Image (cartoon, grey):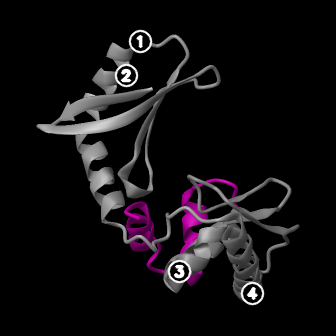
């Protein structure tokens, strides 16, 4: 359902979705600045609008960032053919980088997979599977390296404890700065 709200004297259009699976409200800003609000089934519009108003600064900042992205940017929509081509190249990149960094760490992993994730750059399962977003291929190398190392370190520490960050810091000393920069993408 298409809606409109005024945030800091600026009219913002958004799509309101109700979901039976949603447990809480979710705000998402996508490429081009499209804004989607997902609410649990049965939640009222007034409550959703109050939440959006509370998060007005965040919403406006994210929309500004996503509108500013160039058309050939990381977050643009791609055809299936283009996605499969990028996925294949991303797998080669991830495989090579994992081998390179794991020479230092020496952790055992099961397999590497490339996915088309909307909200994650990577993940590591308890079974030792390393999953990466195909878009790491489109990032500057320092970001791709950080994402690869981040998931490798989860093979040893499946959390974000100080031990985990110490492991990451052994090969990516600027990891705090890179984490902040990645959040801005």
Q: CA distance from mark 2 to mark 1?
A: 7 Å
Residue 96: assigned label: 4
Q: Mark 3 near mark 4, Cβ–Cβ under 8 Å?
A: no
Q: CA distance from mark 2 to mark 3?
A: 40 Å
| Furthest residue in direction left, as rendered | 9
Disc with the residue nearer the chain's start (3 vs 4): 4
Mark 1: give few (<14), some (14-19) or many (20+) Cα within 10 Å.
Answer: few
Q: Which residues are magenta?
A: 157-185
Disc with the residue nearer the chain's start (4 vs 1): 1
Q: Residue 114, image x and y in percent?
A: 74, 67
Residue that label 2 marks: 48
Q: Residue at x 53, y 20 (%)?
A: 40
Residue that label 1 marks: 44
Q: Residue 10, image x and y in percent?
A: 16, 40
Task: Please tell me whether residue 177 belongs to the stretch shown in magenta.
Answer: yes
Q: CA distance from mark 4 to mark 1?
A: 49 Å
Q: Residue at x 32, y 59 (%)?
A: 67
In the figure, 166 relative to 157: above or below?
below
Residue 182: assigned label: none
Q: Mark 2 near mark 1, Cβ–Cβ under 8 Å?
A: yes
Residue that label 3 marks: 172
Q: Secondary structure at mark 1?
A: loop
Q: CA distance from mark 4 to mark 2?
A: 45 Å
Q: Is residue 33 left or right of residue 102?
A: left
Q: Nearer the viewer, mark 3 or mark 1?
A: 1
Task: Please tell me whether residue 160 belongs to the stretch shown in magenta.
Answer: yes
Q: Mark 2 near mark 3, Cβ–Cβ under 8 Å?
A: no
Q: CA distance from mark 3 to mark 4?
A: 17 Å
Mark 2: give few (<14), some (14-19) or many (20+) Cα within 10 Å.
Answer: some
């Amino acid at each position: 359902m298409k809606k409109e709200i005024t945030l800091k004297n600026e009219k913002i259009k958004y799509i309101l979705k109700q979901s039976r699976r949603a447990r809480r409200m979710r705000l998402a800003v996508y490429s081009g600045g499209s804004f989607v609000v997902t609410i649990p089934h049965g939640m009222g519009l007034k409550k959703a609008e109050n939440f959006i108003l509370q998060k007005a600064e965040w919403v406006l900042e994210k929309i500004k960032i996503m509108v500013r992205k160039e058309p050939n940017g990381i977050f643009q929509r791609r055809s299936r053919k283009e996605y499969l081509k990028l996925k294949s190249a991303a797998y080669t990149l991830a495989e090579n980088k994992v081998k390179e960094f794991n020479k230092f760490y020496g952790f055992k992993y099961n397999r590497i997979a490339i996915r088309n994730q909307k909200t994650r750059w990577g993940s590591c399962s308890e079974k030792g599977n390393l999953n990466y977003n195909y878009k790491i291929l489109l990032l500057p190398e320092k970001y791709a390296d950080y994402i690869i190392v981040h998931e490798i370190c989860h093979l040893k520490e499946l959390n974000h404890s100080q031990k985990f960050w110490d492991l990451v810091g052994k090969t990516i000393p600027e990891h705090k700065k890179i984490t902040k920069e990645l959040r801005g993408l």
